[in-house]
Image: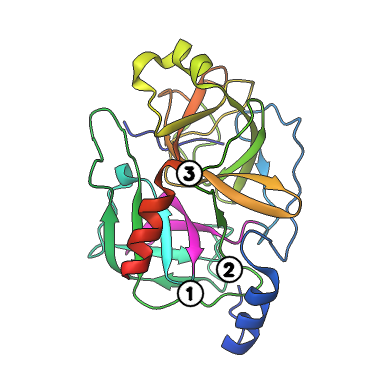
Amino acid sequence: MAFLWALTCLALASTVSALLCSSIGCGVPLISPSVQYSERIINGQNAVSGSWPWQVSLQTRTGSHFCGGSLINENWVVTAAHCEFNPSSHVVVLGEYNLASQTEAVQVKTVSKAVTHPNWNTYTLNNDITLLKLSSPAQLGTRVSPVCLAAANLVLSDSQQCVTTGWGRTSTISNAPASRLQQVSLPLISQSQCQQYWGTRITSAMLCAGGAGASSCQGDSGGPLVYQSGNVWTLIGIVSWGSSNCNVRTPAVYTRVSHFRNWIDQIVAQG
C-alpha cells in the first residue's frame, strides 16, 4: 500500500441505524476485517469490502481521490492538515470500497467547515490534523460507522501491531492509486527508534510505525492507523509523512491522535 506523503453502504433507515450504533458503539465493524499480521509486502492486501466502515475517501468534485480520512461520529471526519481539504472544491465519500466502481451505494457529503489545528506547521509537518464537519449527518449502517478515538492518556507498547488502510500507491515504481481499499499491518516503534531514522523531526505529536517490510505511500495521507483491543478498533494515528519512495525499511510517521484528543473533543463539542 502507500502514503500520500506531505511532500489516502447501503444506508439503513435512520431508526435502524440508531439502533445499530447504540448497540455496537464505535470501532466495531459489522463486516469483520481479515487481518494477517505477517504481511510483509509494500502494498498489503485487498481489504474485505465494508470491513473498515470509518474509512472515507476525500475527493475532488469530479471524483478524483486524493486523501483518506476517518469517520469519528455521524457529523465529523478527521484527516491530515497537509491534505488541504477545501470545502468549496472537495467532498467526503463514505462507504467506498472500489474507486473504479460506479455501482456502489456510497454517500457523498459536502463539508460545512474544515478546522485545522492552530499549531499546524507546513514546514515541520507537526500537528498534522484537520477536522471536517459534514454538511449533513452520515447515515450509519453496515458499511458506514465511526471508529473509536484514542484516549488522551493512552499508552501504547512498542511493537504493538496496528493496521493502516487506504487507496494509495501499491508499487514503488508506479504512481497509480489502488482501485480497491488496501490494508497492511505494521508494528509501532519507539520514539527513540524512530529518531534514529528521522532525527529531531519526530515530536511528541507524532508516532511511528513500520520499517519492518511493509509500508504505506502517496494517496493514503489522512487515513487511519488503528489497533484492536478485544473486538474494538481504536484510531491512534493519522497518516502524515514518510520516505518519498515508500521505503519498506523506513518507519512511517503518523499524527498521534491521543495527543489531540482534548482538542478534538473541544471542536466537536462546539459544533
Query: Could you say whether the residue bearing mark 2 is in a helix, strand or loop?
Result: loop
The percent coordinates of residue 16 (x first, y second) are: 65, 85
Identify the mark at residue 258; answer none if there is no mark.
Answer: 3
Q: Is residue 228 above or below residue 95?
A: above
Please say whether residue 9 is visible from this viewpoint.
yes
State if disc 2 and disc 1 touch (CB < 8 Å). yes
For the residues marked 3 and 2, what is the alpha-carbon distance in whole angstroms? 23 Å
Q: Is residue 267 left or right of residue 119?
A: right
**Residue depicted at 63% across the width and 56% down the height:** 52
Report the predominant secondary structure element of the magenta stretch.
Answer: strand
Question: As shown in the figure, which amino acid type bears the numbered disc 1?
Answer: Ala
The percent coordinates of residue 221 (x first, y second) are: 42, 42
Near-viewer residue (162 or 216): 162
Question: As shown in the figure, which amino acid type bears the numbered disc 2?
Answer: Val
Identify the mark at residue 144; answer none if there is no mark.
Answer: 2
Q: Is residue 138 above or below residue 260?
A: below
Magenta stretch containing residue 64, yes or no?
yes
Question: As shown in the figure, which amino acid type bears the numbered disc 3?
Answer: Ser
Identify the mark at residue 138; answer none if there is no mark.
Answer: 1
* Start-end of magenta stretch: 52-73
